[in-house]
Image (spheres, rainbow, N blue to C red):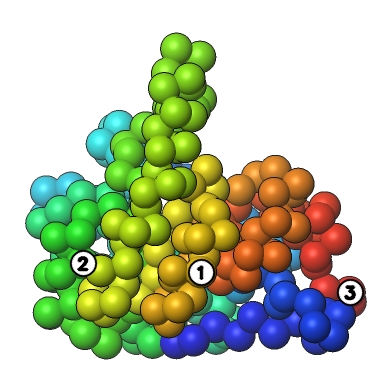
């Protein structure tokens, strides 16, 4: 599925508005009965949800601590609910948080009839190689950088985190190019701190898509729009309106 980024309200010659991607559309620990209210009034082009293996179950969870929640939503049930609630043009980003259950994730997506509108993303290149082999019809995205914690959120780790981001801004485009050129992935899912004009150019030159996570500051949107990123992943359903990028009604 190639999602349409055309904005009928855009100025002639302007970059199209990035796709609006709802982050963690199903919050770990919530109930599926709460999903209609979470989607109500939201103008997402795509929604993201996380999946982990928990014994013989696939469940909606971001990290192992989520598995301690009183409520665990089965991945198949989440897919069925989203398939019913979302308009046909809205895509899914299924983020695999660990390795070893790629086949089960692919099978569930295909069984739900959502393969043509789903992008599977992960930080694990080995998982993407498995998925490319077993389910070539699915679109794949590599999440970068590979980090399991938000080191920018902690006072003691923030200086080192910014130094690492600066290093990655210089080196990541060159490191990614062979993977992009080989067709291993269809998209790059990049933290906003590593997105540069050079990264955007490398992704575009290889015919891939660029999604940026997780952007909750609307002041970042004008630059990302000028760079021509494919989509912006956010927790804030009003983010695009705050930046003046929401189409008029």
Q: CA distance from mark 3 to mark 1?
A: 30 Å
Q: For the C terminus, give its image quadrant.
A: bottom right
Circle 2 sits on which residue? 128
- Name which residue lies at 70% across and 56% down: 223
Left or right position of 218 against 114: right
* Residue count near mark 1 (Cα–Cα under 10 Å), binned few <14, some 14–19, many ≥20: some
* Residue count near mark 3 (Cα–Cα under 10 Å), binned few <14, some 14–19, many ≥20: few
Instruction: Single out the mark in the foreground, 2 or 1.
Output: 1
Circle 3 sits on which residue? 248
Quadrant of residue 85 in the image?
bottom right
Label 3 element class: loop
Q: Position of residue 202 (x, y in %)?
A: 44, 69
Asked if the residue under mark 1 is in contact with the one under mark 2, i.e. CB atoms within 8 Å, the reply is: no
Circle 1 sits on which residue? 201
- Name which residue lies at 37% across and 49% down: 171
Q: CA distance from mark 3 to mark 2?
A: 38 Å
């Amino acid at each position: 599925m190639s999602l349409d980024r055309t904005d009928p309200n855009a100025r002639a010659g302007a970059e199209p508005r990035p796709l609006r991607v709802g982050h963690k559309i199903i919050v770990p620990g919530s109930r599926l009965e709460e999903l209609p209210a979470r989607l109500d009034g939201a103008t997402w082009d795509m929604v993201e949800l996380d999946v982990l293996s928990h014994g013989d179950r696939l469940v909606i969870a971001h990290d192992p601590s989520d598995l301690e929640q009183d409520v665990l939503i089965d991945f198949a049930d989440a897919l069925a609910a989203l398939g019913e609630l979302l308009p046909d043009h809205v895509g899914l980003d299924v983020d695999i948080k660990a390795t070893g259950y790629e086949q089960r994730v692919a099978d569930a997506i295909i069984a739900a009839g959502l393969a043509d509108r789903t992008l599977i993303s992960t930080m694990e290149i080995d998982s993407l190689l498995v998925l490319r082999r077993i389910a070539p019809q699915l679109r794949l995205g590599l999440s970068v950088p590979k980090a399991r914690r938000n080191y920018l959120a902690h006072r003691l780790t923030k200086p080192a985190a910014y130094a690492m981001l600066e290093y990655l801004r210089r080196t990541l485009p060159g490191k990614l190019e062979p993977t992009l050129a080989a067709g291993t992935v269809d998209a790059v899912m990049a933290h906003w701190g590593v997105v540069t004009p050079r990264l955007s150019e490398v992704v575009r030159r290889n015919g891939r898509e660029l999604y940026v996570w997780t952007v909750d500051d609307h002041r970042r949107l004008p630059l990302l729009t000028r760079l021509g990123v494919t989509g912006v992943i956010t927790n804030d359903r009003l983010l695009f309106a705050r930046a003046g990028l929401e189409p008029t009604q």
